[in-house]
Image (cartoon, rainbow, N blue to C red):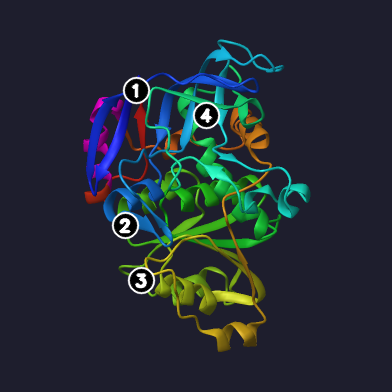
């Protein structure tokens, strides 16, 4: 099979490798679509995210779907020909976090494209049946690959205890910011406003159903957010930009007693926050690390039309053009919101 290997910063090389064989409890999947995540771009451009350092050769990619072409002897519920979305993290099942249902916090998780674990920019991959979720006929394989980033957004909405009647703001209109907006709306939050500095991303937010947008390159964000809430502030703020500026703006326009959900990673891993204001407002801070128990729910939500995930995509490239896709995604953030690779 063909595998795309990151050999150095901003360098992709295609190699030939043996097609993997599924273990007894695994399925072999011929991949059809793989999404390009912000983490892929960060590894590609900088070679690291915090303590996770790429040591080439390395394979990127973790948002994926495809068709089962072989099954292990103990696979019970899936068959050859089924299309599946793959939840990319294999956990131990034995630790405190796994046993209490918080398996996304498992310290021994093996997660696609998180160093040193290789990702899925390759033609075939094996995966446990328990983490391979069948896609209904109405769902395209491309939508299947987008279930993974949507799960991050829904986990953020749940961390914020989103409910009918809330007014929410999302800072950052990249893929995860847009997925957070879609998840808030699907959770019953009627008024969701999105903040960014890139017009194409703000336009995409409006296209996908945002109640309104704030262009932080032209407007006073805090002033405008308070105007939109008649001076009350935000009930829920989901911060996906990962910057010190946006985090402190969120603190300023948050309603007293409200929740701020921190999702975005800063480049340094550290952010100076206006803690005095946060204390005076008695704000609750929640954070997000991936997701848990969401793939089946979100597959149903996309199938029944509750969430329109496919229109988040702005660019589709063939697998052979992966280097071009990654370069363009890094260099043209003003126009590229979400890239997917057709395998």
Within the image, what quadrant is residue 5 found in? top left
Label 4 vs 1, first from the N-terminus: 1
Q: Quick check: 237 above or below 11?
A: below
Say which label, 2 or 4, has the lower sequence index.
4
**Residue 144 image label:** 4
Could you say whether the residue bearing mark 2 is in a helix, strand or loop?
A: loop
User: Where are the magenta residues, as a range?
Assistant: 317-329
Q: Could you tell me residue 162's position as x and y percent?
A: 67, 57
Residue 248 point in image, percent of width and height:
47, 77
Label pair 3/4, CB-CB below 8 angstroms: no
Q: Please identify the quarter of the rendering in which residue 221 is found.
A: bottom left
- Packing grade of label 4 (10 A; few <14, some 14-19, many >=20) is many
Q: Which dot marks residue 198?
A: 2
Report which residue position mark 1 lands on. 17
Counting residues from the start of the chain, the first of labels 1 and 2 encountered is: 1
Seen from the viewer's position, the closer of residues 274 and 191 is 274
**Badge nearest the viewer, 1 or 2:** 1
């Amino acid at each position: 099979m063909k595998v795309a290997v990151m050999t150095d910063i901003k360098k992709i090389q295609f190699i030939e490798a043996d097609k993997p064989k599924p273990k007894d409890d695994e399925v072999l999947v011929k991949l059809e679509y793989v999404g390009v995540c912000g983490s892929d771009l960060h590894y590609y451009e900088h070679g690291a995210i915090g303590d996770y350092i790429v040591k080439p050769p390395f394979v990127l990619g973790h948002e994926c779907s495809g068709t089962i072409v072989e099954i292990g002897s103990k696979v019970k519920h899936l068959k050859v020909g089924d299309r599946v979305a793959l939840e990319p993290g294999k956990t131990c099942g034995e630790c405190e976090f796994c046993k209490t249902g918080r398996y996304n916090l498992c310290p021994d998780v093996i997660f696609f494209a998180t160093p040193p674990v290789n990702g899925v920019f390759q033609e075939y991959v094996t995966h446990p049946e328990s983490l391979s979720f069948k896609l209904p006929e109405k769902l395209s394989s491309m939508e299947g690959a987008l279930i993974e980033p949507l799960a991050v957004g829904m986990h953020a909405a749940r961390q914020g205890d989103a409910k009918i009647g809330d007014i929410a703001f999302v800072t950052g209109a990249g893929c995860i910011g847009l997925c957070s907006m879609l998840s808030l709306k699907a959770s019953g939050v009627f008024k969701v406003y999105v903040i960014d500095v890139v017009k194409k991303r703000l336009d995409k937010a409006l296209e996908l159903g945002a109640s309104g947008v704030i262009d932080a390159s032209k407007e006073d964000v805090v002033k405008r957010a308070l105007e939109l809430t008649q001076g009350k502030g935000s009930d829920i703020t989901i911060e996906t930009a990962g910057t010190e500026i946006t985090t402190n703006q969120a603190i300023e326009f948050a309603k007293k007693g409200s929740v701020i959900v921190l999702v975005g990673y800063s480049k340094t891993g550290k952010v100076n926050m206006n803690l005095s204001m946060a204390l005076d407002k008695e704000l609750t801070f929640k954070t997000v690390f991936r997701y848990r128990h969401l793939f089946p729910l979100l597959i149903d939500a996309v199938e029944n039309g509750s969430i329109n995930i496919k229109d988040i995509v702005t660019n589709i490239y063939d697998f052979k053009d992966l280097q071009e896709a990654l370069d363009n995604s890094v260099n043209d953030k003003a126009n590229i919101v979400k890239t997917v690779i057709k395998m």
